[in-house]
Amino acid sequence: MSVRIVYGEEGVCDAVELLRHGGVVGLPTETVYGLAGNAFDPLAIARIFEAKGRPLTDPLIVHLPAVSWIEQVVQFSSLGQRAIVGKLAEAFWPGPLTLLLPKHPDLPELVTAGSDRVAVRVTAHPLFQKILHRLGSPLAAPSANRFGRISPTSASDVCLELSESIELILDGGPCEHGLESTIVSILGDHLEILRPGPITEDQLKEYGHVSRPGTIVNTPGSLPGHYAPKKRLRIIDSDILSLPPEDRVGLMIFNTSFQEIHGQYAAVEILSSSGDLKQAAANFYGALRRLDQSNVDWILAQPVPEKGIGVAIMDRLRRASYGSLHGKGHQDSNSLVR
Ligand code: TXA
Ligand code: MG
C-alpha cells in the first residue's frame, strides 16, 4: 500500500470519501495525529487495530464535533453525571480533554474493547471538525503510531509510523499541544486523571474532587513501556556517568541552563530554550523521534519540572524509558539492555 499525504479542502474531501467507505485516515488533532475510522463501522475499527498492530484489548477514543452528539455514544447513568459533563464540556471542549463515561449500547463493542465505558472527546482541530460534520458520524481515533511507539505530531511522523499500512494522511501542520489529551474518569463528583495531559489537575479542581494515580498504572493501554523509542533512553539521574564511555549519546534537555553540554554528545535537542513547559510539550515527541533516528546508542533526557503540563511530559518520559530500564521493547540490535 502506498500512502498519500493530502492538504486543505481537497484533502478533506478525499478523507471523507475514504471514511465513508470504511477506510482509515491519518488526521491532525490539536494534541497528536490520530488514525481515524467511523466509530459505528466495526470493519473500519478493525482496520485501525490492524494498521497500528494494537491489541484488541486496548480501547479507542471516540471523537465528536460537539457535545450535542454525546448521547450517540454515551448513556448517562444519572442527571448529576450529565450535569458535570456539561460543565466540563463548557470549560474545556473543544479541547484536549477526554472523558470516560458509560457506553451507549449501540456503539460497537470493538471500540471499547468490550468495556462498558467509552472515552470521548471533542477535538478543536478545524480540519478534524470539518470531517466529522461532513461524515455525520463520530470517529474513533487512537494516536497514529505503531502500538507502543512514539506518538506523531506531524503528517511526516505518521508517514514514518504507518506508511506501510494506511493509504491517506491529511496534513494539518504541526500539533499545537504535542502531547495526548488528559483522560479523566468521572465517578460521582470524583474526577480521576487516568492520563495527565494538556488540561492540568489545577484546571480540573473547580469541577470536582480530583485524584490521580501516584505511579504508573496498568489500566488498559496506559501500560508502562509506551511511547518508546528504539534506542535506549534514560532519564538523567545521579549515575549518569555509568554509561560505557565509548557509546554515542544523544541528549534531550529541557532548557539551556543545563551545564553538561560540552561537545561530548553526538546529538542535542533542546525542548525550550526559554524553559517554557508548553513549548517543551509541543517539541517533546519530535525531539525524541529525531534523537531516535540519529546515530546514537543512548538517549539521555533531563527531567522537566513536574508542574502544569510538566506532569504529562514526565509521565510520557517515564513510560518511554521503561523498556530501557527493564530490558524490554527495544529493537536496537546493538542494545546492551535486552
Ligand atoms: O489526544 C488524544 O487523546 C489522541 C488524539 C488522536 O485524540 N488519542 C490518543 O489515543 O491518545 P490513544 O489510543 O493513543 O490513547 C488513548 C488511551 C489508551 O491508553 C486507551 O487504553 C485509553 O485511552 N482508553 C480509551 N478508551 C478507554 C476506555 N473505554 N476505558 C479505559 N481506557 C480507555
Ligand atoms: Mg497512543
Image: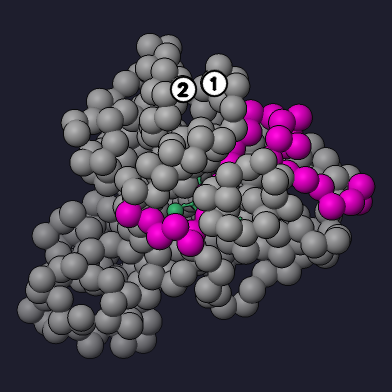
Q: What x and y, as percent, mark residue 255?
A: 40, 58
In the picture of the structure, the residue carrying the numbered disc 2 is 20
* Tag 1: amino acid: Leu
Quick one: 302 or 25, which is closer to the camera? 25
Secondary structure under tag 1 reads helix
Q: Is residue 23 visible?
A: yes
Is 193 on the left-hand or right-hand side of 337? Answer: right
Q: Residue at x 51, y 35 (%)?
A: 41
- Hey, which residue is sitting farthest right in the picture? 79
Residue 95's place in the image compared with 131, above or below, is: below
Quick one: 22 or 131, which is closer to the camera? 22
Q: Which residues are magenta?
A: 53-80
Is 282 on the left-hand or right-hand side of 247? Answer: right
Secondary structure under tag 2 reads helix
* Tag 2: amino acid: Arg
Dots 1, 2 in contact, CB < 8 A:
yes
Q: Answer few, some or many: residues within 10 Å of disc 1's Cα (few below 14, many 20 plus, some between 14 and 19).
A: some
In the picture of the structure, the residue carrying the numbered disc 1 is 135
